[in-house]
Image: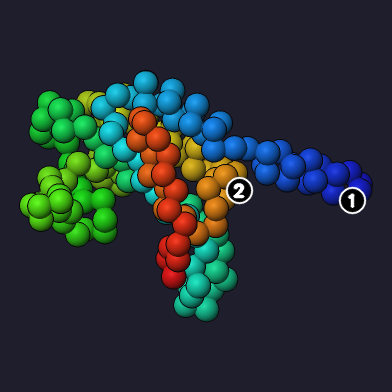
Amino acid sequence: MIEQAMQLHKRYRKMVEGFTQEQFEGWFNEFFRLYPFIAKITWEQYAPSFNDGDPCTFDVHDPDIELTPAFIAEHPELEVTCSEYGYEEEDDDGNPVPDRCISKYSFTKEQQKALPLVADALSSLEDLFKAEDILCAVFGENAKVVVTPEQIDVVTDECGN
């Protein structure tokens, strides 16, 4: 029985390690086609170097979903937030950029009923982000990932440290 479990584990690890960024590009291309009101998805994934005495385990953090300005203009009732932990973003000239991000936490039940396509997009991303081991194998252990309809950018650094 233990040998069978070990063989299953080996096959699973081989499958996880076989995933490529190109496969994710295909998935995200379809995602942006289905949800054209989403301009960008950003997340960090890392194992913290300190966790108040608790084990430092790898984690994929919930994504920030940036909506298109046109979609926000069409839905002024939608609660949008800053993507960078409450700090106001600035453009290249130092001018404030309007908030354009939502998360599963800021998207209320009333908004879910009024905007089911947005709720569907958030649910689809939530399902993807449950596959932490695959995301780690593809994008790395300390990474900030930015996905747009055009590309996937991965910045590896000391995220969370």
Task: Give the SS element for disc 1.
Answer: helix
SS for callout 2: helix
Confirm whether residue 134 shows in the render. Answer: yes
> Would residue 96 be found to the left or right of residue 129 on screen?
left
Pinpoint residue 83: horizontal percent, then vertical percent: 26, 51
Q: Mark 1 Cα within 10 Å, few/some/many (few <14, many 20+)?
A: few
Residue that mark 2 sits on: 137
* Residue 152 position within the rendered picture, expressed as x and y whole percent measured from the top left: 42, 39
Q: Residues within 10 Å of mark 2 (few under 14, many from 20)?
A: some
Please say whether residue 75 is visible from this viewpoint. no
Residue at screen point 68% across, 44% down: 17
Q: Which residue appears at 21% of the width and 32% of the height?
A: 68
Compared across the picture, whether 134 is left or right of 154 comes to: right
Choose between 76 and 147: the one closer to the eye: 147
**Kind of residue at badge 2:** Ala
Residue 127 vs residue 33: left or right? Answer: right
Q: CA distance from mark 2 to mark 1?
A: 25 Å
**Whole-percent x, y for residue 53 in the image:** 52, 78
Can you identify the residue that label 1 sits on?
Answer: 2
